[in-house]
Image (cartoon, helix red, strand yellow):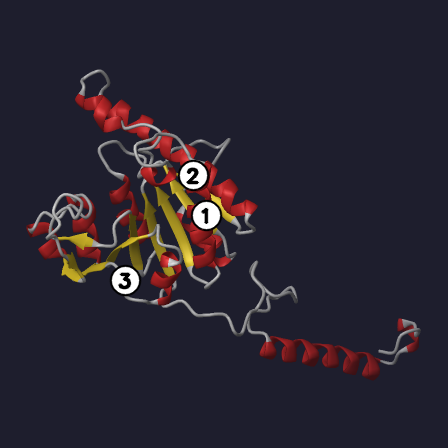
């Protein structure tokens, strides 16, 4: 309909043709832009980038230890270490992968050590450790958003003032919106490690792979720091890892991944660009699968 004319001046046929033309224009836009939503805007938080690299894995769970947030032998959160973790995650997210990060809390408190000393009950010590993971999660969330990467902190323990509760449907919706998930407080239950949490969340969220970020470049026959003859495995089965007691993860986590056919990749995330290389499919570290 030409501008400047009143609706009353337009005949029924011309008005109908105008509507059909608008519908055809909208359908053409939908054809050209398949991510366009019903509102007429491109869906998601990320603009279309036809030349952007494609990720091999659609959805991954990344497990980062609490010690990664601190310098060797220290406690707390070191700003430089936090910045390194943030850069690596942002770099990987730009490939288009849906990423959930499970954080440990060993840099804040080691509940297991307190319990072994007999001063605090194991259950209470484990809950203290869960709160430590929330502290790390808050720091990582703020750092990610400061770099322009949308992120949400979800906790297995109800702390509404600082984190959303972990709800599977809500987590999947965050993925659709292009947000990185930070999963804190483990499973919300004592006696379960954050490694087991990573295996559980990877299963719940239908992840393609579980990435175990470490300070070494894979799984070795022995501790490479103590044994210079130790060699790195390129690939292992879950059964081999369990039988050889390689301490990749705790037995509960390994068994869950084996039963649910969720592969694990152990790699050195301190090497710049390694998280991105992994999600793009480059063969680094040690792959554990059925």
Q: Name the residue under label 3.
A: 284
Labelled disc at residue 86: 1
Residue 31 drawn above or below residue 131: below
Q: Which residue is drawn at 43% across and 53% down?
A: 88
Q: Quadrant of residue 190?
A: top left
The residues tagged by marks 1 and 2 sit, at their Cα atoms, a distance apart of: 12 Å
Q: Position of residue 162 (x, y in %)?
A: 49, 33
User: Could you tell which of marks 2 and 3 lies nearer the N-terminus?
Assistant: 2
Q: Would residue 258 be found to the left or right of residue 50 on screen?
A: left
Q: Nearer the viewer, mark 2 or mark 3?
A: 3
Q: Which residue is drawn at 37% across and 31% down?
A: 132
Q: Mark 2 points at which residue?
A: 137
User: Could you tell which of marks 1 and 3 lies nearer the N-terminus?
Assistant: 1
Q: Would residue 230 be found to the left or right of residue 83 on screen?
A: left
* Extreme-top residue of the structure: 119
Q: Position of residue 141 (x, y in %)?
A: 48, 42
Question: Which quadrant of the rendered structure holds the N terminus?
Answer: bottom right
Crowd class of label 2 (few under 14; some 14 to 19; many from 20; radius 10 Å): many
């Amino acid at each position: 309909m030409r501008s400047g004319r009143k609706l009353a001046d337009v005949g029924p046929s011309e008005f109908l043709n105008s509507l059909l033309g608008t519908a055809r224009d909208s359908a053409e836009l939908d054809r050209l832009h398949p991510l366009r939503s019903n509102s007429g805007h491109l869906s998601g938080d990320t603009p279309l980038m036809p030349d952007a690299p494609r990720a091999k894995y659609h959805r991954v769970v990344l497990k980062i230890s609490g010690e990664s947030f601190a310098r060797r032998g220290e406690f707390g959160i070191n700003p430089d270490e936090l910045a390194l973790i943030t850069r690596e995650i942002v770099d990987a997210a730009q490939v288009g992968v849906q990423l959930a990060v499970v954080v440990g809390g060993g840099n804040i408190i080691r509940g297991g050590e307190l319990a072994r000393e007999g001063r605090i009950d194991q259950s209470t010590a484990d809950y203290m450790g869960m709160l430590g993971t929330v502290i790390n999660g808050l720091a990582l969330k703020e750092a990610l958003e400061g770099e322009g990467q949308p992120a949400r902190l979800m906790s297995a323990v109800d702390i509404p003032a600082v984190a959303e509760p972990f709800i599977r449907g809500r987590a999947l919706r965050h993925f659709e919106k292009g947000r990185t998930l930070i999963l804190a407080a483990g499973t919300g239950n004592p006696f379960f490690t954050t490694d087991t949490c990573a295996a559980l969340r990877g299963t719940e969220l239908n992840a393609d792979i579980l990435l175990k970020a470490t300070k070494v470049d894979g799984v070795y026959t022995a501790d490479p720091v103590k044994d210079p003859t130790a060699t790195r495995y390129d690939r292992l089965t879950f059964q081999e890892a369990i039988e050889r007691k390689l301490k990749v993860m705790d037995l509960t986590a390994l068994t869950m991944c084996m039963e649910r056919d969720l592969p694990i990749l152990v790699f050195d995330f301190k090497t710049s660009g390694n998280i991105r290389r992994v999600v793009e499919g480059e063969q680094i570290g040690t792959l554990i699968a059925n």
